[in-house]
Image (cartoon, rainbow, N blue to C red):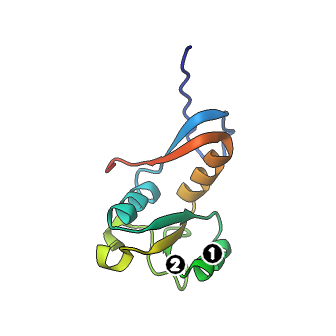
């Protein structure tokens, strides 16, 4: 059976149906996600919107991570930089993350693929 590989360069583009999708936001979101998990975060929950992230974090007693326009929204525990991830802060914790592009791309991919992975140069 032939295998097909498609590249979608923007979260705004139409997504093909797929068995597996890899989301790569090389500079920030997926790298930060890899650092959070490597730092011992128990769970990473992705959301599309800031209000949704706040509600989910309250519900789960989780840390908030992310950005809008490159800056962490008011009240967030972490921005969207791997440099901010400290294992002593995230170990064993659930982290709810929302970003301008990366988390939205991952959530869109989840609607088009059976499996979704977050890929970064560090993983």
Query: In which quadrant of the rendered view does residue 79 lie?
Result: bottom left
In the image, is 54 to the left or to the right of 72? right
Question: Which residue position is annotated with label 1?
Answer: 56
Quadrant of the frame with the N terminus: top right
Q: Residue at x 39, y 56 (%)?
A: 31
- Determine whether the residue tagged by mark 2 lies in a helix, strand or loop: loop
- Expressed as whole percent of the image width and height from the top left, the position of residue 57 reads 58, 78
- Expressed as whole percent of the image width and height from the top left, the position of residue 40 reads 35, 67
Q: Is residue 6 above or below residue 102?
A: above
Query: In which quadrant of the rendered view does residue 82 lie?
Result: bottom left
In the image, is 30 to the left or to the right of 96? left
Give the residue furthest to the top.
1
Q: Is residue 15 visible?
A: yes
Q: Viewer-proximal residue, 94 or 55?
A: 94
Query: Is there CB contact under 8 Å for labels 1 and 2?
Result: yes
In the image, is 123 to the left or to the right of 96? left
Q: Is residue 119 above or below residue 85?
A: above
Q: Residues within 10 Å of mark 2 (few under 14, many from 20)?
A: many
- Determine whether the residue tagged by mark 1 lies in a helix, strand or loop: helix
Query: In which quadrant of the rendered view does residue 36 lie?
Result: bottom left
- Expressed as whole percent of the image width and height from the top left, the position of residue 61 reads 54, 82
Q: Viewer-proximal residue, 44 or 24?
A: 44
Q: Is residue 50 above or below residue 29?
A: below
Q: Viewer-proximal residue, 44 or 49?
A: 44
Q: Residue at x 55, y 84 (%)?
A: 74
Q: CA distance from mark 1 to mark 2?
A: 8 Å
Q: Residues within 10 Å of mark 1 (few under 14, many from 20)?
A: many
Q: Residue at x 40, y 62 (%)?
A: 32
Q: Viewer-proximal residue, 42 or 111?
A: 42
Question: Which residue position is annotated with label 2?
Answer: 62
């Amino acid at each position: 059976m032939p295998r097909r590989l498609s590249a979608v360069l923007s979260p705004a583009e139409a997504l093909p149906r797929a068995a597996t999708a890899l989301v790569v936001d090389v500079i920030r979101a997926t790298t930060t996600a890899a650092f959070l998990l490597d730092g011992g975060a128990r769970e990473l929950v992705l959301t599309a919107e800031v209000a949704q992230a706040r509600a989910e974090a309250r519900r789960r007693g989780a840390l908030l991570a992310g950005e809008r326009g490159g800056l962490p929204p008011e009240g967030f525990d972490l921005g969207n930089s791997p440099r901010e991830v400290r294992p002593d802060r995230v170990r064993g914790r659930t982290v709810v993350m929302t970003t301008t592009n990366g988390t939205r791309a991952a959530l869109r991919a989840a609607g088009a693929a059976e499996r979704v992975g977050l890929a970064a140069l560090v993983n």
